[in-house]
Amino acid sequence: MSQIQKILHLRLLYYQKMFGERYIDNINTQPSNVEVSVPMLSLEDTIAHCALCERSKTSKPSFGILPPKAKIVFISGLPLVDAFNHFVENRSSKMLQDIISNVFKLRAPEYGVLSLVKCNENDLNVPTDSDALICRQYLNQQMTLAPIKITILMGDFVLRHLLGVDFNQHKGRIFSEDGRNYLATYSLNQLLKNPSLKKEAMKHFLLAKGIL
């Protein structure tokens, strides 16, 4: 268990305490030389059992898809993958699958699909800034688990909360932060609502494909 995962687990306990959870330590009056091993949750388990916000009460958190040898990762605002690593049935998910297959020509072990916010109550539910603040810690840790060559950030919400930079200034170009390569493009919802953006987004995707 890495140090950052221990920190995430401790933060999870603090958040649960803020939401009313109570912890009581047993008092042991007898000295003991026996070392007690307390199991730590893996990152995937930590996300799966997260209960830090209202979303988690009506939706099971999604870890996403992240093969150990993923070369590229697509990050959306809300999950496009369910808790069982299956693509959800909606238009955004279908569009991303088409992009992965038809534009990038990638096989399953070569790409990851993650989200900034880990719970999706329904397709129309808009994530809030507080949702992003809670979940961002998980996404940052996920991105250290695979040798990712480039990360596609889909939409202003993801870019703003993950890196804190302006979407219009970074849209459609490859840039580096903390030794990682990123490309910002439109969200899938934007592409669905405004098909005229697809031509520009295609240029963005082809630019990212050149890194692979």
Image (cartoon, rainbow, N blue to C red):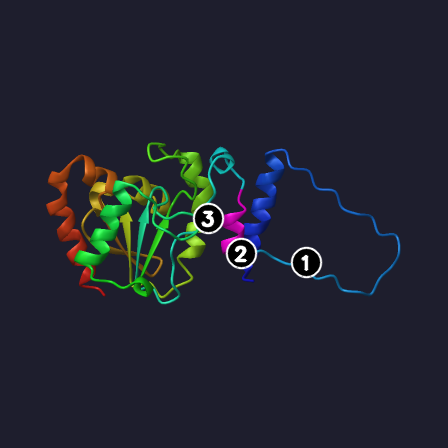
Q: What residue is drawn where x is 31% and y is 62%?
A: 108
93 and 68: which one is in front? 93
Above or below 96: residue 121: above
Mark earlier in primary sequence (2, 3): 2
Q: Amino acid at mark 1?
A: Val
**Residue 57, magenta (yes or no):** no
Above or below 194: residue 95: below
* Residue position for label 3: 137
107 and 199: which one is in front? 107
Q: Residues within 10 Å of mark 3 (few under 14, many from 20)?
A: some
User: In the rendered view of the protein, which quadrant contains the C terminus?
Assistant: bottom left
Mark carried by residue 5: 2
* Residue position for label 1: 38
Badge 3 element: helix
The magenta stretch spans which residues?
42-50
Q: Is residue 118 left or right of residue 23?
A: left
